[in-house]
Image (cartoon, rainbow, N blue to C red):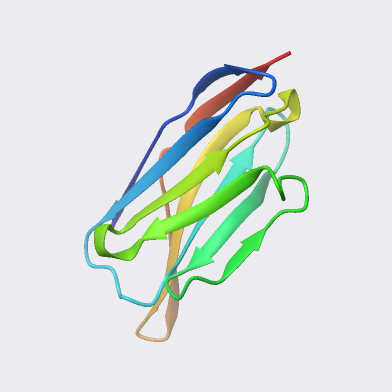
Amino acid sequence: VQLQASGGGLVQTGGSLRLSCAASGSIPSINTMGWYRQAPGKERNLVAVITSGGSITIADSVKGRFTISRENAKSTMYLQMSSLEPEDTAVYYCNLQFRHERLQKSYWGQGTQVTVSS
């Protein structure tokens, strides 16, 4: 299983970006994809996750500004980020989780840098 994240960049405060994460390989139809972010010197934190059934969990810090979505047929997930703030600056990682033979599998993408200038 491989994950390829893209769409990061430099944007001014109040701007928007759209991240994409494409998954490839042997992936069960039932799975959870998510976005996490890690700022310099800080822990990696959940931004938002979405199940293959469409259930969404989103962090309070981005609620109302970020939207997570996915296209199951393409094994692709998106994160639409609006009203960006300098505090959103981080490396954003995509994650894929599923159960395989009673084991919980977790895969990470390579990360994409998002920088919000004030």
Q: Where is residue 36 in the image (x, y as percent from the top left)?
A: 58, 47
The quarter of the picture where the C terminus appears is top right
The answer to whether 72 is drawn above or below residue 24 in the figure is: below
Q: Which of 36 and 66 is in front in this view?
A: 66
- Can residue 111 be seen in this snapshot? no
Occupied quadrant, residue 6: top left
Say above or below: 29 vs 74. Answer: below
Residue at 62% of width from left, 30% of height from top?
90
Specify the quadrant that holds the N terminus.
bottom left
| Residue that protrudes farthest toward the left in the picture | 25
Residue 16 x, y percent position in the rendering: 57, 29
Most distant residue in the bottom direction? 102
Image position of 111 (left or right of 42): left
The residue lying toward the viewer, choosing from 31 and 41, is 31
Q: Is residue 79 visible?
A: yes
Answer left or right for 15 relative to 96. Answer: right
* Image mark count: 0
Residue nearer the viewer, 102 or 64: 64
Task: Establish if 77 lies above or below 86.
Answer: below
Q: Nearer the viewer, residue 20 or 45?
A: 20
Kindly identify the residue that appears in the image at 73 percent across and 23 percent down. Answer: 86
User: Which residue is depicted at the point 56% across and 60% down?
Assistant: 49
Q: Position of residue 113 (x, y in %)?
A: 52, 27
At horizontal 53% and vertical 53% (from top left) the residue drawn is 68
